[in-house]
């Protein structure tokens, strides 16, 4: 492949879908590993499949500005993306349909991320782990920097990006400094929860991808707060983990587990057993919104 895989692949109807740090969206045969479809998509997160369609975030540039939006590709009964057929010789394959309005995404730019605390910390961690000269050449970190603004080993390993969560009839996604809910049918924005912190100073993102937990979603934030958010976009609870958080939570029978940026595993007992259903990182099939 052109670069490393972002976060994790998705398996659906005998196919494996993966996005790379080179922006490719690739479908493999799950049994043989053969590449079935591959397309330059400027994908900035792993894909999610919900209700027979593939969703992912895409970077778009205009002049000196960068933006991000969620795009959608319908799948047929065999799991093939209807807008992603293998192209005939010399003809490009069709791009997926834009599903939402685009949001400004300064956090995907190298000139934004390079001046942040996160960039300095990531370089120091890399040096301490034998990567003072940068990521291995095989990782092709240069294309990652061009796509998401990061190129350190640490920055790529913990990058999850704007990873879509199917939640009821909405798609939820953390985009830089906000948790955003989109109506799945229309793509219209339903609500936005601003996340605490100073993204321009801190770097990375201010929140991790949401985890579904009953009637709520759980969002760890860089400020150390864990937000419990209702379906309507209200912050029902704010829990303190005591350290910065950059990766997704696990939620099981009222307990929220988070890994902190300074190497701790923290368990928060909410006392509410209805907060459950996300018992592993990435949530398994729960990410589709069906909880299977």
Image (tube, rainbow, N blue to C red):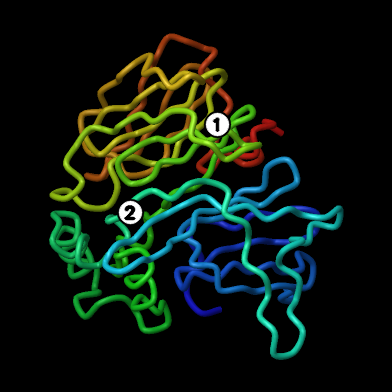
Residue 93 coordinates in the image, percent (x, y): 68, 75
> Comparing marks 2 and 1, which lies closer to the viewer?
2
Q: Quadrant of residue 27?
A: bottom right
Q: Which residue lies furthest to the right in this view?
A: 77
Depth check: 254 or 68 in front? 68
Quarter of the rendering containing residue 223: top left
Q: Which of 167 and 15 is in front in this view?
A: 167
Residue 142: x percent and y percent?
34, 78
Is label 2 in contact with label 1 (beta carbons under 8 Å)?
no
Q: Return the x and y of residue 116 as percentages of the image width and height.
A: 15, 56
Q: Which residue is drawn at 51% across and 20% down?
A: 231
Instruction: Indicate whether 147 appears above or below 87.
Output: above
Instruction: Please indicate whether residue 248 sits to the left or right of residue 188 in the image.
Output: left
Q: Which of marks 2 and 1 is nearer the N terminus?
A: 2
Q: Is mark 1 on a helix, strand or loop?
A: loop
Q: Which corner quadrant holds the N terminus?
A: bottom right
Q: For residue 24, what is the image quadrant?
A: bottom right
Left of 256 or right of it: where is 66? left
Real-space CA distance between mark 2 and mark 1, rounded to the nearest whole angstrom: 28 Å
- For residue 278, the mark is 1
Q: Within 10 angstroms of label 2, few (less than 14), some, or many (20 or more) residues? A: many
Q: Of 190 and 205, which appears nearest the observer?
A: 190
Q: Name the residue under label 2.
A: 105
């Amino acid at each position: 492949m052109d670069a490393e895989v972002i976060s994790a692949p998705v398996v659906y109807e005998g196919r494996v879908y993966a996005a790379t740090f080179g922006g490719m969206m690739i479908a493999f045969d799950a049994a043989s590993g053969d590449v079935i479809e591959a397309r330059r998509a400027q994908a900035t997160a792993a894909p999610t499949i919900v209700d027979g369609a593939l969703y992912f975030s895409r970077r778009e540039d205009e002049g000196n500005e960068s933006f991000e939006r969620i795009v959608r590709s319908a799948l047929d009964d065999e799991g093939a993306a209807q807008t992603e057929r293998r192209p005939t010789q010399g003809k490009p394959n069709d791009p997926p349909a834009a599903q939402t309005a685009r949001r400004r995404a300064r956090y995907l730019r190298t000139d934004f991320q390079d001046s942040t605390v996160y960039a300095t910390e990531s370089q120091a961690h890399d040096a301490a782990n034998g990567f003072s000269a940068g990521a291995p050449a095989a990782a092709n970190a240069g294309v990652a920097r061009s796509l998401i603004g990061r190129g350190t080993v640490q920055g790529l390993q913990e990058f999850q990006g704007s990873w879509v969560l199917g939640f009821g009839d909405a798609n939820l996604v953390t985009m830089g400094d906000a948790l955003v809910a989109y109506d799945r049918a229309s793509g219209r924005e339903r609500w936005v929860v601003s996340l605490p912190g100073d993204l321009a100073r801190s770097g990375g993102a201010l929140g991790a991808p949401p985890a579904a937990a009953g009637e709520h979603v759980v969002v760890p934030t860089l400020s150390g707060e864990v937000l419990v958010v209702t379906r309507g976009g209200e912050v029902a609870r704010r829990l303190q983990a005591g350290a910065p958080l950059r990766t997704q939570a696990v939620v099981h029978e009222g307990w929220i587990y988070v890994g902190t940026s300074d190497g701790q595993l923290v368990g928060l007992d909410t006392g509410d057993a209805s907060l459950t259903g996300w018992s592993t990182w990435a949530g398994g099939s729960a990410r589709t919104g069906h909880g299977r």
